[in-house]
Amino acid sequence: MEKLGDSIMHELEMAEEEVCSAWLAYYNKAMEFCGSSASDIKTKQAGARVGAPVDPNAVVHGCTDVWVDEMRYRMAVAFLSSVWEKCSSELSKLFLSMKDAECNRRNRIKELLIKATQRQERLWLGLPGVVTPILKDLIEWPMERKIVEDDVQSSIRARAQSIQRDETLHKKADDSTVKAAGLTGVNMKDGNFELSSPLVSDLMSRAKVIEKRGTGLMSTWKVTLAIVTEDSFLQLFDLPSSCKLHPGSAPEVAFQNLIPPVIVPSLEGIKGGIKIPSAKTWFDNLAPTESFVLSNCTVSIKDVTAKDPNTFELIEALSGKMMARTRKMQFRAVTREEAVDFVEALKKSK
């Protein structure tokens, strides 16, 4: 039970660290662009890939798209909420098992004491005046489940209050810096905050499930979730191999396929030696596979009379230390109308 409790606390702490890390990255990125002119923002975005300092909290190194960090923060909060809900369920089971174990323990002790006392009575018949009241008290010892549960609950509450007092005394002095980053006025007792999906963010302008293909000879068409953001970025998320979606599927369904199930420690898992994956691996599919700065890109669509009129191409100019380079990517929509519509969205976001 102690191992399970420690594992659950570790999972909750890791989930909270992910939220703090995602929030600081999002807050720092937002403050970096806050107050900047449109031309300054375009300059920062265009040069995002060249010599960018490494931010340990950044979702994608060298990417200045605020939506990516906002998306990571929203999903970190959703992850924490799910972990908290499942850990609460496991803790409830743990408390129930503790109550059952305590009830069984007390009943067993009662039986053993009665048998021991009865044996002593047979051995010490010369002391009836002492044995009789003891045996009477043991038989009348209350064993109602409600009384036992109240005793266990009281012990748990006392221990929790003791831990809370210790944490208050040893609280880190720099905790206030995190709260000052935008959580002023939030009632911390509420807890378990819920945020809306990143796909309804004001920082996102278009989302679509289409196909992509590189320019290599061995490149094949792959289904991807393409997201156009208000900061002039195109973010591509490769869908897991287990996902059976096709071009034109709902973006919300595709995004849900990027989110793995939340697994928390359980009593059965502890006994079976099941290894719980790290909280950091939960976000592996939530980092863009490809990121394009649209202000550095040119987009062209094939002619309506071409063999594949639903295809369009994106070419991004990359700044290098020695010479300029380009990166190409082909995309294919379900219909010509969808391809034209998405190309217009890309051009409008530049």
Image (spheres, rainbow, N blue to C red):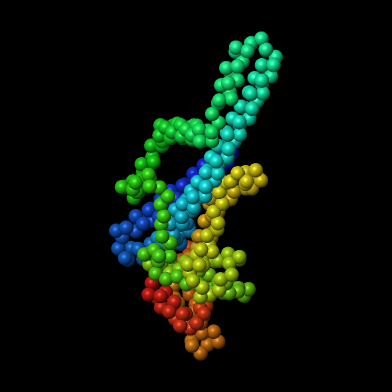
Residue found farthest to the top: 126
Split into 4 quadrants, where in the image is the N terminus? top right
Q: Position of residue 180 (x, y in %)?
A: 33, 46
Q: Position of residue 220 (x, y in %)?
A: 60, 74
**Residue name at image x 38 percent, y 47 percent:** 190
**In front of the other: 299 or 12:** 12
**Residue name at image x 52 percent, y 56 percent:** 283
**In front of the other: 208 or 153:** 153
Q: Is residue 131 left or right of residue 78?
A: right
Numbered marks: total: 0
Residue 137 can be seen in this image: yes
> Does residue 322 sit above or below 192 in this rendering?
below
**Residue name at image x 58 percent, y 18 percent:** 134
Q: Is residue 176 left or right of residue 323?
A: left
> Does residue 12 sit above or below 112 in this rendering?
below
Residue 76 can be seen in this image: no
Q: Where is residue 83 in the image (x, y as percent from the top left)?
A: 50, 50
Split into 4 quadrants, where in the image is the C terminus? bottom left
**Residue name at image x 31 percent, y 65 percent:** 38
Q: Where is residue 187 in the image (x, y as percent from the top left)?
A: 34, 46
Residue 202 in which image quadrant:
bottom left
> Does residue 175 sit above or below 111 in this rendering?
below
**In front of the other: 56 or 70:** 70
